Image (cartoon, coloured by chain):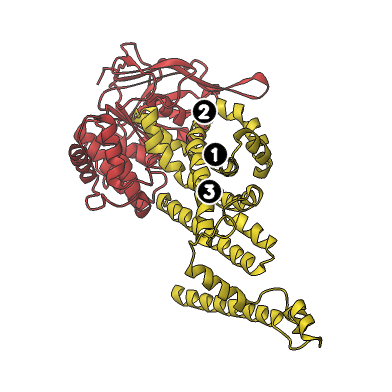
Chain colours: A yellow, B red
């Protein structure tokens, strides 16, 4: 029953993809000779003018280019011509570094705030003000103080991924069931052991949910941050290819950003499932 | 049975109410229990039964007064007093064995893993869950979960067990079986037990002493009913005992009418000397604190007139 539903859903997905690619192909194909002109002039004007070809690349162009990229993902021909694999690796490394730093700060801090009503109330106004700030707004300040564009990008990732994790950790820790805490109390379990044996496992699903939201935001922000700081990374690649007017490469980059984002989300979803307990 | 193993002395619980007023749930509450005794508390919701139990457990502190257990005033929770929670309160990410072992390793921190496991296993066997050690609480039925709760409480070999309506969420059949188990275990181990219940029959079956509390706020301990049924009573012939209905009617009368009117009708009620009620056995008194007790006699059919 379930497998047949999955099979049917898969078929519908494939049909939708085929329809999308078909419409895309039809919309961007050449319509034959559009205007007659002298061969020199025609050469100058390109296929768009002579054969009615859309400036937008079709799925076949994108597919061919993508295949080219996939064959050589790690080539390096200087600052403005690196393989997509290298650009993605730079972006993932930045996201990973900023994100891990945020985990190291947000989870212990969230534990502290969640377990202490005093700290929770005292820090609340700061968190409320800092949370809605667009991470890119920190960029000039980061560039000015850190004086290194690559570290500034990592800082921006750090600052944007810290809030969902911090708030979810606080919430998860503060809303651990009273009865579980009471069990630990009646067993005279010390504060540290209680934190690790009762509060951490009970809050883990909520904390992991915060981490999953954070990785999504971090991956959204890295593209914009790299467009600003330049040099390397998939965000820079998109902007560089836009300057080169290579729409094909821009489309490929968009596709890869989506796939990597999905993979990051799936990894965190798997971790969340590992710590979730049925009640 | 005359020593006071547990003595609750003049405790009160007040909460700050609206507009600076304070709400008093109960005050000047005195209650004592002997070692090895099984006591049930019966009263309507809101009379502070659970608060009394939480104070005994050390989860809650009284606004006034003290609780003395085994000659020492308590402060906070203790491994000497195990609690069986109404909602079983098992840690869902641990297995049955893991839940019991958590309690065991909390009590004996220096024990190695094998010793903790063997000790926990013996209590899982005791409550009849052999074979389910590696199941998670979500895979167990309500009755099995509460068995784990009982195993966990017993595994730390406490001086007393505190039970807050432990069987109220279970179906009637499971409840009966678990009552039998608890009764058997308490008799075998000589455990002192304090149980809150809403179920009159449960109290009659399990308790040596039944505490009747009036309605809150301002609840008082109205009477201590001494259970006249023999200690080796069985579930099946309980209701054939000549004093069974007298006892049951007395408790139900109290719950239905007297719990509301008791305070108004009994102005001279002395909370330090709560009357001890003996159903149908005139002439037998329990002098629990050396002072003379006021006695109330409820006439029952004389023993021997059983059908």
> Residue B292 in the image: x percent, y percent?
34, 12
Q: Residue furthest front?
A: A40
Residue located 51% across and 44% down the image:
A99
The secondary structure type at the circle numbered 1 is: helix
Looking at the image, tell me whether mark 1 or mark 2 is earlier in sequence order: 2
Q: Is residue B271 visible?
A: no
Which part of the image, by quadrant, shows the C terminus of chain B? top left
Name above or below for residue B109 compared with residue B136: above
Identify the chain of the residue marked 2, using the numbered disc in the image: A
What distance separates the C-alpha of mark 3 from that of mark 1?
A: 17 Å
The secondary structure type at the circle numbered 2 is: loop
Identify the chain of the residue marked 3, using the numbered disc in the image: A
State the mark number for residue B140.
Answer: none
> How many C-alpha atoms fall within 10 Å of the one at disc 2: few (<14), some, or many (≥20)?
some
State the mark number for residue A166.
Answer: 1
- Between circles 1 and 2, the one closer to the viewer is 1
> How many C-alpha atoms fall within 10 Å of the one at disc 3: few (<14), some, or many (≥20)?
many
Looking at the image, tell me whether mark 2 or mark 3 is earlier in sequence order: 3
Residue B17: which quarter of the image?
top right
Q: Is residue A237 left or right of residue B101?
A: right
Asked if the residues shown at circle 3 and circle 1 are in contact, with their CB atoms under 8 angstroms apart, the answer is: no
What distance separates the C-alpha of mark 1 from that of mark 2?
A: 14 Å
Which is nearer the eye, B77 or A29? A29
> Residue A178 in the image: x percent, y percent?
46, 36
Q: Which residue is mark 2?
A: A116
Residue located 45% across and 31% down the image:
B50
What distance separates the C-alpha of mark 2 from that of mark 3?
A: 31 Å
The secondary structure type at the circle numbered 3 is: helix
Q: Which residue is mark 3?
A: A95
Which is nearer the eye, B145 or B186? B145
Looking at the image, tell me whether mark 3 or mark 1 is earlier in sequence order: 3
């Amino acid at each position: 029953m379930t497998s047949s539903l999955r099979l049917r859903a898969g078929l519908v997905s494939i049909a939708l993809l085929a329809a999308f690619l078909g419409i895309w192909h039809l919309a961007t194909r050449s319509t034959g000779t559009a205007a007659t002109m002298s061969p020199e002039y025609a050469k100058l004007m390109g296929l768009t003018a002579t054969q009615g070809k859309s400036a937008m690349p079709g799925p076949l162009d994108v597919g061919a280019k993508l295949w080219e990229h996939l064959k050589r993902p790690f080539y390096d021909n200087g600052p403005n011509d690196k393989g997509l694999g290298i650009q993605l690796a730079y972006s993932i490394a930045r996201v990973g570094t900023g994100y891990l730093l945020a985990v190291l700060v947000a989870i212990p801090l969230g534990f502290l705030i969640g377990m202490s009503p005093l700290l929770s109330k005292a820090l609340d106004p700061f968190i409320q003000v800092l949370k809605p700030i667009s991470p890119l707004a920190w960029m000039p300040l980061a560039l000015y103080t850190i004086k290194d564009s690559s570290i500034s990008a990592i800082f921006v990732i750090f600052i944007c991924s810290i809030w969902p994790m911090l708030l979810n950790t606080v919430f998860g820790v503060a809303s651990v069931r009273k009865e579980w805490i009471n069990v630990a109390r009646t067993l005279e379990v010390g504060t540290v052991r209680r934190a690790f044996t009762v509060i951490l496992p009970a809050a883990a699903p909520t904390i992991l949910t915060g981490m999953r939201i954070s990785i999504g935001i971090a991956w959204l922000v890295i593209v914009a941050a790299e467009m600003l700081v330049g040099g390397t990374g998939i965000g820079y690649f998109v902007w560089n290819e836009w300057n080169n007017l290579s729409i094909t490469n821009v489309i490929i980059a968009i596709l890869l950003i989506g796939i990597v984002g999905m993979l990051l989300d799936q990894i965190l979803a798997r971790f969340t499932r590992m710590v979730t307990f049925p009640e | 049975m005359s020593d006071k193993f547990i003595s609750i002395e003049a405790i009160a619980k007040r909460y700050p109410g609206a507009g600076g007023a304070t709400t008093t749930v109960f005050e000047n509450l005195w209650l004592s229990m002997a070692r090895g005794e099984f006591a049930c508390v019966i009263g309507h919701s809101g009379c502070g039964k659970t608060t009394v139990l939480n104070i005994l457990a050390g989860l809650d502190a009284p606004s006034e007064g003290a609780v003395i257990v085994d000659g020492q005033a308590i402060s906070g929770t203790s491994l000497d007093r195990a609690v069986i929670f109404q909602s079983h309160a098992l840690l869902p990410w641990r297995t049955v064995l893991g839940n019991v072992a958590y309690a065991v390793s909390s009590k004996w921190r220096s024990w190695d893993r094998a010793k903790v496991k063997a000790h926990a296993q013996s209590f899982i066997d005791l409550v009849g869950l052999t074979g389910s050690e590696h199941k998670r609480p979500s895979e167990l039925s309500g009755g099995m979960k509460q068995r784990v709760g009982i195993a966990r409480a017993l595994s730390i070999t406490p001086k007393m067990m505190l039970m807050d309506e432990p069987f109220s969420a279970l179906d009637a059949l499971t409840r009966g079986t678990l009552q039998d188990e608890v009764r058997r275990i308490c008799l075998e181990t000589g455990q002192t037990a304090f149980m809150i219940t809403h179920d009159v029959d449960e109290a009659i079956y399990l308790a040596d002493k039944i505490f009747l509390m009036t309605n809150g706020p301002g609840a008082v301990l109205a009477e201590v009913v001494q259970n006249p049924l023999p200690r080796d009573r069985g579930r099946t012939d309980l209701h054939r005992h000549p004093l069974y209905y007298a006892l049951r009617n007395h408790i139900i009368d109290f719950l239905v009418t007297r719990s509301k009117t008791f305070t108004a009708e009994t102005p001279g009620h002395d909370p330090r000397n709560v009357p001890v009620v003996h159903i149908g056995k005139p002439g037998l008194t329990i002098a629990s604190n050396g002072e003379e007790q006021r006695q109330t006699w409820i006439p029952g059919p004389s023993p021997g007139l059983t059908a």
